[in-house]
Amino acid sequence: MIINQRLTEALKERAYKEKFDLVGIANIHKSHKIPLRNSAMQAWLANGNQASMVWMQDPYRQLVEELLPGIKSILAVGIDYYIKAERAPGKLAIARYGWGQDYHRIIDQRLRRIGRWLEQQVPNCRWRTCVDSSPFIDKAWAEEAGLGWIGKNSNLIHPRIGSWLLLGHLLVDIDLPADTPTDSHCGNCRRCIEACPTGAISEPFVIDSRHCIAFHTIENRNSELPELIKKQMGLWIVGCDICQDVCPWNHSPISSAKDLELHPRDWILELTTQQTRAWSDEEWQRKLRDSALKRIKPWMWRRNIGHIVSK
């Protein structure tokens, strides 16, 4: 056990060297909360809250042992993506997670370097990386590893960083000492619920994607947005940060993320309808290269912007 404790400390130190801001360990066999999270996920799916996101029903999402046979522990990591910058007044709004380079690639590459380092410490060990595009309940395992708690808006919240967190996980077949899971500190607060203009937070901790601006601007592949969304989305054309902007844990002094890869592209904070209506598909693709937003096709950008009075 002493050897594994030393390995855990070295593993965490290696993760911090990869510029992760938060690091923790979860043990898959010692969790009491994960079964409850799985049950909540089943209820969420049964009520149709996933809308058209059929991949949320992937059974592997609740069978972590299938992702890495022999798994014993999970290294959970988080990157602070809050940048102290604001879009120009009256300009089109894009959720902060998409301002910089593609975080999926950033996190995956860093985790892979950690995995290769781990192989040098423990020859023949097995590992697998997971980001939020993997069939994996990432927020639940991050909570289990002590990185924060899942708030009423379904985001993971850390007392210092707030909810501006990008998550990644390294699954390993090594039994490592686990960190203490985080307790919730939302209390009686309902600010996120009351601030959502479409009522998408149907009850604490439950997001109904059918009413969510972020879902419709990013995932909805229909040619037209629902009238409720068009009426309430304001200037949000990709994603929505309203429930995070009002969260008290995001109002305490928060330092700006130092990771330059997450800083906004030049055009992100100055976007106007006049500009976007003049851009060809090729121009959109050029601007979205190496961005998490590239999965939003040019026609979807035009659809999302189409109902907005020129800005």
Image (cartoon, helix red, strand yellow):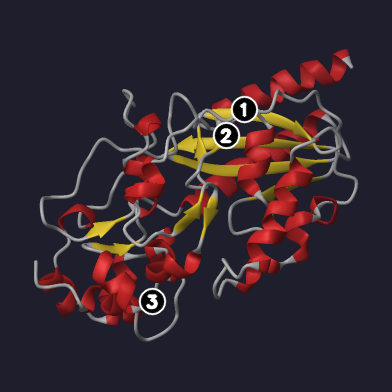
Instruction: Say whether residue 290 is visible.
Output: no
N-terminal-most mark, 1 or 2: 2
Give me the residue at 33% from left, 51% from top.
Answer: 99
Disc 1, disc 2: CB below 8 Å?
yes
Q: Secondary structure at mark 3?
A: loop
* Amino acid found under the numbered disc labelled 1: Asp
Residue 188's place in the image compared with 235, above or below, is above
Residue 141 placement, left or right of 107: right
Give me the residue at 27% from left, 73% from top.
Answer: 230
N-terminal-most mark, 2 or 3: 2
Give me the residue at 71% from left, 34% from top.
Answer: 117
Marker disc for residue 297: 3
What crowding class fits label 3: few (fewer than 14 Cα within 10 Å), some (14-19), or many (20 or more)?
some
Instruction: Report the residue marked by disc 2.
Output: 149
Q: Position of residue 191 (x, y in %)?
A: 37, 41
Instruction: Report the residue marked by disc 1.
Output: 183
